[in-house]
Image (cartoon, rainbow, N blue to C red):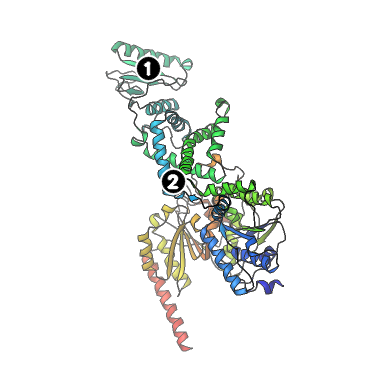
Amino acid sequence: MHKDELFAHLEKNPLTTKQYEACASQAKTTLVLAGAGTGKTSTLMGRIVYLWEKGLNQAHQILPLAFAVDAAHEIQSRIEKVATSVGGFSLEGFQARTFHSLGLYIVSAVEGQQPLVSTLIDENSLLSFFQMHFSQLRKENLSYREWLYQYYTFYDEQSSRRTLNDDYVLNQTELRIANRLYFLGIPYCYHAHYEKDIYLDKPYQPYCCTFYLPDRKLYIDVLDCKETELSLEQQQRQQKLNNIHQHYGTNYQIFYADDEVMFEPSTIYTDPMLSHSVGRMDSLLKLLINLFLYLKSMGYSSQWLKTYLQENQTHSDEKTFPLLKQYCLYALLYPLWQAYEDYLKDEKSIDFDGMINKAKQYIKEGRFIVPWQDILIDEFQDISLARLQLIQAMREQNPAIRLFCVGDDWQTIYQFAGSELTYIRDIAQYFGEVKVVSLDTTFRFHQQLGDISSTFVQQNPRQYQKELRSFDTRIRNSVFLVPQNTEHKNIETVFAHVLYDLQIDAPKTCLILARFNHQLPDEMTLNRWQTSYPLLLFRCASIHASKGTEADIVIIVDVNSGEEGLPSEKQDRLALFKCKEETFLYAEERRVFYVALTRARERVYLCYDVQNISPFIEEIQQRHAFIQRIKKSNDHSIKKQSWVKWFSGWRDRLMKSLEK
């Protein structure tokens, strides 16, 4: 059957030549690079229909896989409509699944019953569980407190010589001793005055010891060097101090950089969470939870972590700082992970990653025979190692399986969840020879927006280089720069500009995006805007949450430099554990910005602080001089002008229609 007959009415638009080429691929592994708006779901539909039409497989032998439940439901719903409209196709045994539901299906088939899904899959439940065990370990486990001491003294990048008692000390030796006292439960005063008026160095500057332990009436001075490295001046000063303490009969001790702190712990231990360090404990716990989820997405278990700790516990003097920090965090995570797995065992339940890993094991052991001949994977760029290994296990059991992977390396933005650019970029390493088909036509936005976004994202040479043409070839201004002050005050300038410039007479969808959720307007503000601008239908989301959506108008706020800018310069606290293959500056953040730009069908407004402008905006300005900047103006004046112009245009159009 000719492709025009087969696919002309499959979707709203006939499949393009490239889409048909992808659908008709005879390769064992096909990678379809589907840029923003190029019809990836339509291509998946076309592939399924092609397999049916050519008699290559029946419905029950085809497995479409998606990452989100909504995406799986959409594939199932759309293929049911296609089967109904085309006719002659039986859907018996056909089921679009998520990776998690696939894992659950395989485990249930092998074990003869559906396992109980753990209550800890809920984010809040998981947090509460970890908080409880983290607190218990701090209170009851001396070894765990030792690892906490090690972390906060040597590896906490946020410490900046800030002790757990909230003192800012002068050097690493003081930090080490202060934190040791803290975890021993020994109260101290930092830079306490001596009980007598003693002046050593300058007039009117009485002698202050480094630490004073009131419970033990002990004065401590700290020198950030070895005893053998003291200068003559330091030796003379210390001799004076020794004489003073001997003269007045006060307890005194000196600590040097290489001294161990040898004190008996307090008989009553105060949990640090109840003292000064609540925020820092919460920050560490959040890091441990994120590390836990990341390692699980890689297919690891607490047993793997235990083995790592056992095999790497010696020769600490030979390890680099990153390896020492990694070991410390693993040591802090292990008992929490072990408690988590014990809980699942007692509950006789399974979590999402457990479903995937167990399913993979059952396939490798031959306890589950893979019934599918064609596996179609949506959003392949989001795949994690554990999911990748599940597909590999299926292919190893049945080498005849055809893989049809649809994704866009330009939209690989979920590294925190285990996805890596290498899985899509180097797919041949995992599945052998691959046919790559790039969909070259976008149906979402016009050519100018396509050129700006494609040029921007392709600066990274590690990504696939591809050309993206627009179905809409009209030349229109699509990207506008908006100087923005705090609290979104200038966003209303954008609304007015949209009404004034486009003269809209029917509702337009307006999506407000931010790099972080807390940068988005609250519900009250959104409702006020909706009342004031009824022709703009507002939604807002973080950029990561917006993936897969689109709108007529997109407004991106806080496109600034800095930690909470775009690109975000926040330190990735899991970078130590992740793949090191990407070296291009802001590689993932560049893709995040591309995703934001390509949510728009018509226009993108970039709101920024002129004193703190994002390097991304500067780069776009340099390459595309035609991009317009909306000047700051009186919001009320613009709003009034825009409504007057819109009403005038609406009146003229109405009169013309009446004349006809």
Q: Secondary structure at mark 2?
A: helix
Residue that extends furthest to the left in the rendered view of this protein: 196
Position in image of residue 263 (x %, y %): 38, 20
Mark 1 or 2: in front is: 2
x and y, in percent, of residue 29 in the image: 69, 56
Q: As drawn, is 280 to the left or to the right of 67?
A: left
Residue in the picture at 40% in, 67% down: 638
Of the residues shown, which amino acid type is indicated by label 2? Leu
Disc 1 element: strand
In the picture of the structure, the residue carrying the numbered disc 2 is: 126
Q: Residue at x 68, y 67 (%)?
A: 17
325 or 130: nearer the viewer: 130
Looking at the picture, tell me which residue is in the foreground, 201 or 360.
Answer: 360
Q: Position of residue 149 (x, y in %)?
A: 43, 30
Q: Earlier in the sequence, mark 1 or mark 2?
A: 2
Outermost residue on the bottom side: it is 659
Q: Which residue is mark 1?
A: 253
Label 1 is placed on what type of residue?
A: Gln
User: Quarter holding the N terminus?
Assistant: bottom right
Q: Please, is residue 400 above or below residue 254 in the view?
A: below
Label 2 neighbourhood size at 10 Å, few (<14), some (14-19), many (20+)?
Answer: some
Q: Residue at x 45, y 47 (%)?
A: 120
- Total numbered labels placed on residues in the image: 2
Q: Is residue 621 visible?
A: no
Q: Residues within 10 Å of mark 1 (few under 14, many from 20)?
A: few
